[in-house]
Image (cartoon, helix red, strand yellow):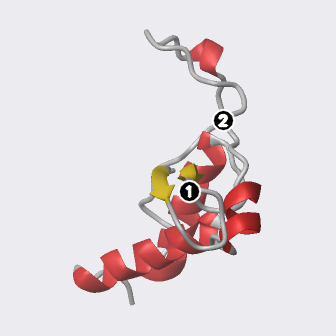
Amino acid sequence: MAMKGIILAGGSGTAGVYHLMASGHTSRFEFARAIIDIMEEISGTTTGWASVKPTTSDQFPLPAKRPRNPVISKDRIEREYGIKMLHWRDQVRTFLRELAASRNWGR
């Protein structure tokens, strides 16, 4: 999931660097599974999609360590600026629908 750092100044909030990302939280497995579920819904078919199975970081050793719980609070930007982000699943669904429409995928 993409995360953006933004700098806000002025207004009623406190100036500074804020992290902005979708609301909610998920695992990498749940994120991958959601993409397949949403594409099955968009395409109208449940066949031909990849199979996603849960695993752990220990089963997939990589040079860089991955954070165990990379959840970031968005409370400050909501409290100070009233910015509330859509849930990550809604953002993924919107993106995939737009992508499918631009490629004439789907029903």
Q: Quadrant of residue 41?
A: bottom right
Q: Provide residue 25's location: percent of width, then percent of height.
A: 71, 52
SS at circle 1: strand
Mark 1 Cα within 10 Å, few/some/many (few <14, many 20+)? some
Residue at point 69% right, 75% down? 82
**Picture coordinates of residue 65, whole percent (x, y):** 55, 14
On screen, residue 64 versus residue 54, left or right, reads left
Residue at figure coordinates x 22%, y 79% from the top left:
103
| Looking at the image, residue 47 lies above or below residue 30 | below
Q: Residue at x 24, y 83 (%)?
A: 102
Label 2: state its secondary structure: loop
Q: Is residue 60 left or right of residue 72?
A: left
Picture residue at 42% right of the left edge, 73% below the top? 95
Kindly identify which residue carries mark 2. 70
Three-letter code for the amino acid on which mark 2 is drawn: Pro
Most extreme residue toward the bottom, as rendered? 107
Give x and y (percent) for residue 96: 42, 73
